[in-house]
Amino acid sequence: MKWSNIIATLATTVLAVTALITVYLTVAAWKVQQEAARPYFVLMESPKVDLGQEINFELKFNNVGVHPAVNLSSETVVFDEQLAGKPIHHDESAIVNEIPKDALSSLVMTLPDNALDFRQNDIKPHYVVVDLQYGDPILNKVYSQTIYMKWNGVEKGKIQPTVHVRVEEKAKILQYFKEQGIDPKVRS
């Protein structure tokens, strides 16, 4: 074999390997870009608690992703901060309409009349866990988000704020779910 053939073969091999690496990096970047455009929900403001004839929680979500979201379903569990007994509220709901980018969507939970005496001046703190599942019609993928919050109840007739739980509280909540046989990701 001549040296010129060997050099040409090596050069062709290097170019082929470089082309394969370029294709791989392009596809990987494209996948990352697609994933970054997926629908994603954030709370627009602190959850609103209304003590009228019953206790209502309203959570306002905004789709901050580029892609719309479809088939949004939520599983909501409300239970005492002491993690004792069954949840006072465990409900599933769904929105069938497409939720485009920057669109608001509200989730309103009404606690049953027998769950808490909302006419009293003091209501103990409660955890509120909301699991959202929704689809991306462009990527044809399903996503899930779980939001862990703590409503600090009512003190001396004044509604207390709702805050995100701490890491150690989340571990206790997950243990409570295990003991109660609750999986907020499972829909009926």
Image (cartoon, rainbow, N blue to C red):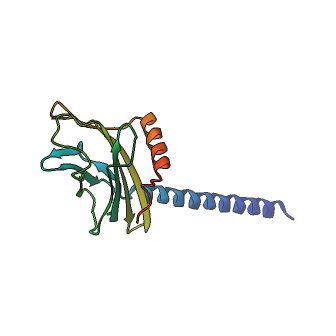
Residue visible at 76% across and 63% down in the picture = 9
Q: Could one spot residue 67 in this view of the protein?
A: no
Q: Nearer the viewer, residue 128 or 107?
A: 128
Q: Nearer the viewer, residue 7 or 78?
A: 78
Q: Nearer the viewer, residue 92 or 89?
A: 89
Q: Nearer the viewer, residue 91 or 64?
A: 91
Vertical placement of residue 125 versus 89, above or below? above
Q: Position of residue 14 (x, y in %)?
A: 69, 58
Quadrant containing the N terminus in the rendered view: bottom right
Residue visible at 39% across and 50% down in the picture = 146
Q: Position of residue 73 (x, y in %)?
A: 34, 62
Residue visible at 44% across and 60% down in the picture = 186
Residue 168: name its quadrant.
top left
Q: Position of residue 43 (x, y in %)?
A: 28, 47
Residue at the extreme top: 156
Residue visible at 29% across and 37% down in the picture = 125
